[in-house]
Image (spheres, helix red, strand yellow):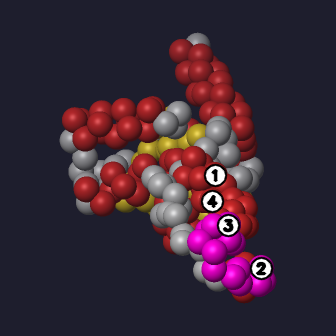
Amino acid sequence: MASTAAIELKSGLVNDYAAKFKAATALVVVDYRGLSVEQVTELRRSLRAEGVEFKVLKNNISRRAMAEAGYEGLASEFVGPTAIAYSNDDVVAPARILYTFAKANEALELKAGFIEGEIATHEQVMELATLPNRDGLLSMLLSVLQAPMRNMAYALSQIAEQLDSGVEAAPAEEVANEEAPVVEEATE
């Protein structure tokens, strides 16, 4: 009887985590062998602050949950002390936080993962980790969108200055072709 209950419990865990993994936008599998309890606690705190879940499951349960979620290609990554970090909101956060933590704690090793439903190799996870977070990317986009308006405002101010000083104004196309001073936006 006890073994039937254990099988049902494990089956329920597999189903629960398979649903969570399917809903995630990004997931990273890591080897945490060699990290102290304090380091793992610090890592969990960093991940939780950005809405990233960090789970340590038995490898057999992880493999079965990944297979049920449609990520059979990750089954080979579940060897040794393995943990999973996943996010439902920010695609970059799990990889970025783990990468930053791994630079300071060499015992943490990023293995592989998936990004928006596609299995990602170690190299792809590392590329993703070097991207700025969502707010940083939005800031960069906003800066690009503001550049034409900033250049137009600069050109008009140069024409107004020349008119005020009594100097004959340069043709508008010359002023518009001048390089406006670039104002760097702060990114994380």
Q: Is residue 27 left or right of residue 107?
A: right
Q: Which labelled disc corresponds to residue 172?
A: 2
What amino acid is found at the position of numbered circle 4 in the picture?
Answer: Ser
Earlier along the polypeptide chain: callout 2 or callout 1?
1
- The residue shown at (44%, 44%) is 83
**Distance between mark 2 and mark 1 Cα atoms:** 32 Å
Element under disc 2:
helix
- Residue beneath disc 4: 143
Q: Residue at x 41, y 51 (%)?
A: 98
Q: Is residue 70 above or below residue 15?
A: below
Q: Which residue is mark 1?
A: 138
Callout 3 amino acid: Ala
Q: Position of residue 56 (x, y in %)?
A: 44, 37
**Where is the N terminus found, in terms of image quarters?**
top right
In space, the residues marked 1 and 3 are separated at their CA atoms by 33 Å
Please, what is the three-letter code of the amino acid marked with disc 1?
Leu
The magenta segment is: 159-173
Residue corresponding to mark 3: 160
In front: label 4 or label 2 = 2
